[in-house]
Image (tube, grey):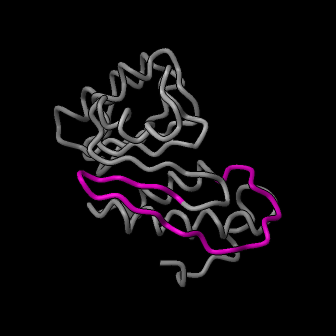
Amino acid sequence: MLPADPSIILVDGFVPEIALRIVRKAKERGIPIVFDGGSWKASTSELLPFVDYAIVSERFRPPGVNEPDVIDAIHDFGPKAVAVTRGGQSIFWSLGDARGTIELTSIVAVDTLGAGDIFHGAFCYRFEGDFVKSLEFAAKVSAESCRYVGTREWISHWTNSVS
């Protein structure tokens, strides 16, 4: 089910049977697991205990949890690090006892289609153990993608200045 040597796993829980099989294997092998949470799903409570890094949208809420308590509630399920993305607004993050905010670069957004997926992909691409630096990188890449129409046009304009 897993490639021989993945450096990181990203799951979203849309197909819980497969996601759970993947995270169990990844956890056994010590592979970092990132969760992309757009909205709470019935299987999310089964998946989160395996997750190391939960990156969720502001719409993501465990049942019965109010907005100010979302980060703590997610930590209670097991992830050691949590980030809440909020569209074009700052990102809230928590890692152990540390908490912070990442301010976003102001851009003129032409198309936000795929911005969340690009964010998560960039986070995983950059991740080398530093949660906050990876979030900062992902925010820059995702913002750059929003400056162009479609989910791929930005790539042809990409420079490594976003690092």
Q: Is residue 93 above or below residue 37?
A: below
Rendering coords of residue 59 (x, y %): 61, 36
Left or right: 100 in relation to 151: left
Q: Residue at x 49, y 15 (%)?
A: 42
Rendering coords of residue 7 (x, y %): 29, 51
Q: Is residue 105 magenta?
A: yes
Q: Residue at x 46, y 68 (%)?
A: 136
Q: Residue at x 26, y 41 (%)?
A: 4
Please name whichever residue, 76 or 127, is drawn nearer the observer in this view of the structure: 76
Left or right: 49 in relation to 38: left
Q: Residue at x 51, y 21 (%)?
A: 15
Magenta stretch in the rendered image: 91-115
Query: Which quadrant does the N terminus fall into?
Result: top left
Left or right: 26 in relation to 60: left
Please name whichever residue, 86 or 116, is drawn nearer the observer in this view of the structure: 86
Q: Is residue 78 magenta?
A: no
Please name whichever residue, 24 or 58, is drawn nearer the observer in this view of the structure: 58
Q: Is residue 134 above or below residue 57?
A: below
Asked where in the image residue 90 lies, by quadrant, the reply is bottom right
